[in-house]
Each structure stands twice: as structure tokens, then as C-alpha cells.
Image (cartoon, rainbow, N blue to C red):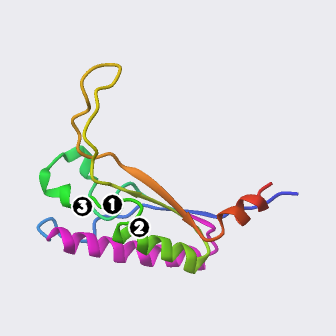
Amino acid sequence: MSRIVRCSLIQATNAAPPDASLSATKQAMIDKHVAYIEQAAKAGAQIVCLQEIFYGPYLCAEQTTRWYDFTEPIPDGPTIRLMRGLARQHRIALIVPCAPPAAPPKAGPKGPPHESPFHAKTQVFSALISAFSASLR
């Protein structure tokens, strides 16, 4: 018996002008993505995946200190708490890439530590993850 799993991948342009404050940019992007998440859930998506560091520009490549304030704790930051609630409300698995504050760099086996202060991490939330996983077996 075949099972269909409906997925939604969301990638969006920046909703704020380049000179907007960090808080205005982040809020505009979160608002934009919340609407897309709701649209995907209403269309029947069971898994919704957001683009990396969805709440602003892809700051890892730029390495401008202006973006350091975009980081937030994982799993207890305000964006993650919001997304956890959306996953529960819409009964979906929600994949949320965010930028946590960086831990001090460690030297690796191939030399000095990586200089980037950003290490994107992904959180997966779902009110139904175990039931959904069981349904795929």
C-alpha cells in the first residue's frame, strides 16, 4: 500500500528594505513565513521546511557583525518557541533552520578552528512526530 506524504519547501525573498533595522527585518520575515506555513498546512502539507536562516538574509556568507544580533538560543529562543506552537497548531512537522550564538571555536583535526561565528542548526518540531513516523512504517 502506498502512502503519500505531502511536503512543502518554503524559500522567500527578503521582505524588508536593506536599510531596515534588524528587528524590523526579522519580524517582517517571520510574519511572511508564518503566512506561508499556514498556507502550506491548509493545502495539506504534513512536513514544512523553511530555508536556512529564514528570518533574514543568509548572513553566514557575509560575515558582517551587523547580523550577529540575529542569533538566538536554540531550543528556547523566541522564534523557535513560535515555530513550535505553529507546528502544534497545524499538526505538521516543521523544519526550522536558525543561527544560534556560536560556541568558542575548537581546533579541528585539520588545523586551526573555523573563524565563522555562525553555525546554523536545524530544529524539527511536530506535535505528531511519533504518530506520523509510525504511519510511514
Q: What residue type is labelled 3?
A: Phe
Q: Which amino acid does label 1 sit on?
A: Pro
Name the image quarter holding residue 100. bottom left
Q: Residue drawn at (19%, 46%), measured in percent from left and top? A: 62
Q: Give the range drawn in magenta.
A: 21-48
40 lies above or below 51: below
- State the SS at label 3: helix
Tag shown at residue 80: 2
| Quarter location, residue 50 | bottom left
- Neighbor class of circle 3 (other Cα within 10 Å; few <14, some 14-19, many 20+) is many
- Disc 3 versus disc 1: distance between alpha carbons? 10 Å
Comes first in the chain, label 1 or label 2: 1
Q: Does the magenta-highlighted stretch encompass residue 133?
A: no
Q: In this view, does 2 lie to the left or right of 119?
A: right
Q: Residue 57: give x, y in percent of width and height.
A: 26, 58
Which residue is drawn at the image coordinates 13% and 57% (left, top)? 66
Helix, strand or loop at label 2? It is: helix
Residue 127 location (% of width, % of height)? 61, 71
Figure quadrant of the C terminus? bottom right
The residue at the point 20 percent across, 72 percent down is 23
On the image, numbered disc 3 is attached to which residue?
Answer: 70
| Left or right: 26 in relation to 88 | left
Q: Does 89 sit above or below residue 4? A: below
**Residue beneath the point at 45% across and 71% down:** 83
Q: To which residue does mark 1 refer?
A: 73
Residue 46, x across and y down, in percent: 63, 67
Report the residue that reaches farthest toward the right: 1
Q: Which of marks 2 and 3 is nearer the N terminus?
A: 3
Query: Does the CB distance between marks 1 and 2 fall below 8 Å?
Result: yes
- Up-down relation of residue 24 to residue 60 (above or below): below
Q: Quadrant of the N terminus?
A: bottom right
Of all residues shown, which one is farthest toward the top?
A: 110
